[in-house]
Image (tube, grey):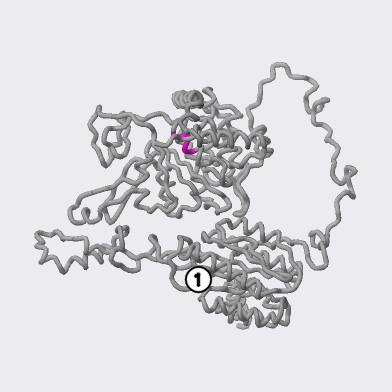
Amino acid sequence: MTTPFPFTAVVGQDDLRLALLLNAVSPAVGGVLVRGEKGTAKSTAVRALSALMPHLDVVSGCRFSCDPDAPDPACPDGPHEPGAFETRPARMVELPVGASEDRLVGALDIERALAEGVKAFEPGLLADAHRGILYVDEVNLLHDHLVDLLLDAAAMGASYVEREGVSVRHAARFLLVGTMNPEEGELRPQLLDRFGLTVEVAASREPDQRVEVVRRRLAYDDDPARFAARWAGEEAAVRQRIVAARELLPSVRLGDGALRQIAATCAAFEVDGMRADIVMARTATALAAWAGRTEVLAEDVRQAALLALPHRRRRNPFDAPGLDEDKLDETLAEFAEPEEDDDPDPDGGPDGPGGGGQPEPDAGPQGGDSGARPEAGEDGEPQASGAGEQSPVRASEPFRTKVLSVPGIGEGAAGRRSRARTEHGRTTGARRPQGALTKLHLAATVQAAAPHQRARGRSGRGLVVRRDDLRQATREGREGNLVLFVVDASGSMAARQRMSAVKGAVLSLLLDAYQRRDKVGLVTFRGAAAEVALPPTSSVDAAAARLESLPTGGRTPLAAGLLKAHDVLRVERLRDPARRALVVLVTDGRATGGPEPVALAGRAARLFAAEGTASVVVDCESGPVRLGFAGQLAGELGGTAVTLDELRADAIAGLVKDVQGTSRRAA
């Protein structure tokens, strides 16, 4: 077996190590989500933790790791004979991103269940991880339905497998650790909330610390066993401390004062539900046990808040998780238990020298600091930085957009935009299974088996079902798409109010893409060329940041923008051929850049039509006289055109309301 990198040899990353150790002390905390850039020892620290976990006593021969002192009465391998057990290390089970549902929860032999009535169950990774660690690298890339199954099992401590009336349940209590790179996309808020703690990690900027990281890694790679031996003493000490903290944990007292601080903190940061309060209480208790104390102190509550609340506070979808520590300290101080004062100072009251009778001088505009602020433009934005280019403007308020989808039926990654053949969704038909049977179509299976019953010598009321009779259910759900935004940032779009509205519309579409689990990309064009402002990514917040800083000005190289977008799609099809694309072109349709700009733009647009690429042109033309260039461009693209007003989801409802109002007035 490969020698893991010692946990105590990890340089820095104090919050990460503490969060992992607290879960080792109290698995009820609910696991850890580790967020950070690549190459920051996330996976190394998690794998190293498994070596520190205390060894387990398990029932001999039990595939579900039952505790011999308290075996699961519903264990599929039970009932267990008392006395027979073995001791082994706690397991660390890794869940691959591409794992199937059967691999995660286990699989039933449908053929034996139907033909023989036997519950032949093959355990999955949840059973393997029981009483150990379940590690999911790149958890943000895991299919949503797998994450839901995973977190449900972690919350209930059990896994349920139900297929066509056959049900199996087994215990599944484990320390859940997920790692992710935020640049590759965020988890949904509902899923974030199910992780007990979250930790942000980043590479150190201290040269000495970076040198030590490299030195230790090279030493480990040269001779892992020798390197691990050097840290054996520290590892044993931490392992013993975990055991001691587990034994002390039931004796730790969480007083009313600490509970009040926890409740006040969760209320101050406007977290939804009560899970945050419970997780904070468990974390603070584990912190006290880890410190060898039997009472929770204010410092434990503060540390628990920093670990349990950043991913739960209310925030905009594109805001990174985080916590205002000044606000946290103010809340904890306000709700701290008052200290008893045996010798009060008569001069310390409200009217004494130390009191608050007189306010401090105001340092604001009336305090002598007037005239020190720079002037801004009439719209509150800084003035343009040059004649040919205007500085970025803020996006207008986002709104709920109408659903833009790709026509036809795809087979891409699970999402919420376009129709697709998926493993989950409504049943639309049946087919012969290709590979392992995952979703049985019972009616189609019975219909296939019925004509052969006499030849098979059926007796009694049973139905003889063979493998050739089995039918796989075909299902239709929704997929996520690649939404490629191609944004005109030329001078014709640069009027400040107009560009603000355009950015607001694109931001609204980005919010929609975030909710529908799409990948997004951003191409912009202005002046003499086009550029890929953001290659296709699952990080929608990165696209929002690039959009916010987008400058405008210059001519309109529409053909260059379309050709750049075409090249981006060509490369992306090679990487992910199953994911279908939706091009959203945001422009007024004018083409003024390069030789023969209109003819070149038309030829570039027809490339998308020839390949059948779905497209939508968001027509940004405004004013009483409109030339209709965007509509013509949409026709050459083989797509549709919508105005900024029509992009709003409530546009049709508003139109109906206006028509109804006109009719009533006429009556």
Would you say residue 47 sits in the magenta stretch?
A: yes
Which residues fall within the magenta stretch? Answer: 46-50
Q: Is residue 264 above or below residue 511?
A: above
Residue 241 placement, left or right of 664:
left
Residue 432 shows in the view: yes
Residue 530, compared with residue 306, is above or below; it is below
Comparing 389 with 376, the one in front is: 389
Q: Which residue of the protein is positioned furthest toward the top in this rendering?
A: 343
Whole-percent x, y for residue 519 in the image: 54, 61
Task: Tell me which residue sits at (24%, 29%) in the image.
Answer: 82
Which residue shows up at 62% across the image and 56% down it? 542
Residue 311 x/y as whole percent: 57, 45
Q: Which residue is mark 1?
A: 406
Q: Position of residue 89 (x, y in %)?
A: 38, 32
Pinpoint residue 408: horizontal percent, then vertical percent: 45, 73
Give the image quarter of residue 495. Answer: bottom right
State the residue at coordinates (90%, 50%). Answer: 371
299 or 10, nearer to the observer: 10
Query: Circle 1 sits in a helix, a strand or a loop, which is it?
Result: loop
